[in-house]
């Protein structure tokens, strides 16, 4: 009987420690910790997308350089973008777009060693609108790192599309 109790206690101790070993290293979310510039970005999707290991988002490797108003930019991502035969692209929220910025750099204000091509040092639209004035949307300048608001239909800016994640609220 005493031997059975010892085996039972030993078995419980083993079971108690197993999850610690089997799950080690798998519970960290994509945004945990800071990655080096070389670890952060990985070119994926047959060389047409960039996976950001810090945020878990996939970006266009080479955005289109023509400018569009906010509505046209939105349509460009949703309807006209099929990268590596995959749909589901969208205009990024301002928090997602600004996550690309490294304000220690300029022209472009992106992390050193980023893999993006065709980046214009200029303003890129986000899907995020101004809750106090729905005719305005947030944008980020990938040349300077500035983040501001502009009128959606009177301005023509650049577009970079994103896939994955959840943009959260579109009004900021």
Image (cartoon, grey):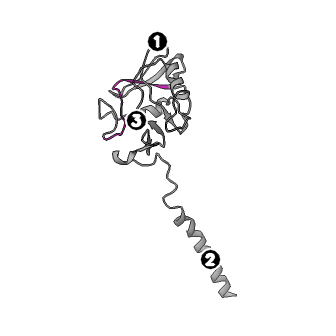
CA gap between label 2 and label 3 equals 49 Å
Q: Residue at x 63, y 82 (%)?
A: 7
Membership of 8 in magenta stretch: no
Q: Residue at x 37, y 36 (%)?
A: 116
- N-term mark: 1 or 2: 2
Is there CB contact under 8 Å for labels 1 and 2? no
Is there CB contact under 8 Å for labels 1 and 3? no
* Numbered mark located on residue 105 in the image: none
Q: Is residue 19 left or right of residue 106?
A: right
CA gap between label 1 and label 2 equals 70 Å
Q: Residue at x 33, y 26 (%)?
A: 121
Mark 2 Cα-neighbour bin, 10 Å: few <14, some 14–19, many ≥20: few
User: Closer to the observer: label 2 or label 3?
Assistant: 3
- Which span of residues is magenta-colored? 113-126
Query: Tag 3, which secondary structure?
Result: loop
Query: Tag 1, which secondary structure?
Result: loop
Residue 150 in the image, given as x and y percentages of width and height? 45, 17
Q: Main secondary structure of the magenta part?
A: loop
* Numbered mark located on residue 11 in the image: 2
Q: Which residue position is annotated with label 3?
A: 100
Mark 1 Cα-neighbour bin, 10 Å: few <14, some 14–19, many ≥20: few
Q: Is residue 28 above or below residue 88?
A: below
Q: Which residue position is annotated with label 1?
A: 154
| Residue 148: quadrant of the picture | top left
CA gap between label 1 and label 3 equals 25 Å
């Amino acid at each position: 009987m005493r031997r059975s109790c010892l085996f039972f206690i030993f078995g419980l101790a083993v079971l108690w420690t197993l999850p610690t070993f089997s799950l080690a290293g798998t519970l960290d979310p994509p945004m945990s910790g800071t990655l080096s510039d070389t670890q952060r970005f990985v070119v994926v999707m047959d060389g047409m997308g960039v996976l950001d290991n810090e945020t878990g988002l996939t970006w266009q490797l080479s955005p289109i350089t023509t400018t569009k108003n906010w509505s046209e930019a939105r349509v460009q991502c949703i309807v006209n973008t099929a990268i590596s035969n995959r749909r589901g692209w969208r205009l990024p929220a301002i928090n997602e777009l600004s996550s690309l910025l490294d304000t220690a750099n300029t022209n472009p204000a992106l992390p050193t060693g980023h893999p993006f091509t065709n980046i214009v040092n200029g303003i890129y639209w986000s899907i995020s609108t101004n809750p106090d004035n729905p005719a305005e949307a947030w944008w980020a300048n990938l040349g300077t790192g500035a983040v501001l608001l502009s009128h959606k239909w009177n301005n023509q800016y650049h577009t970079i599309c994103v896939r994955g994640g959840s943009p959260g609220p579109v009004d900021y």
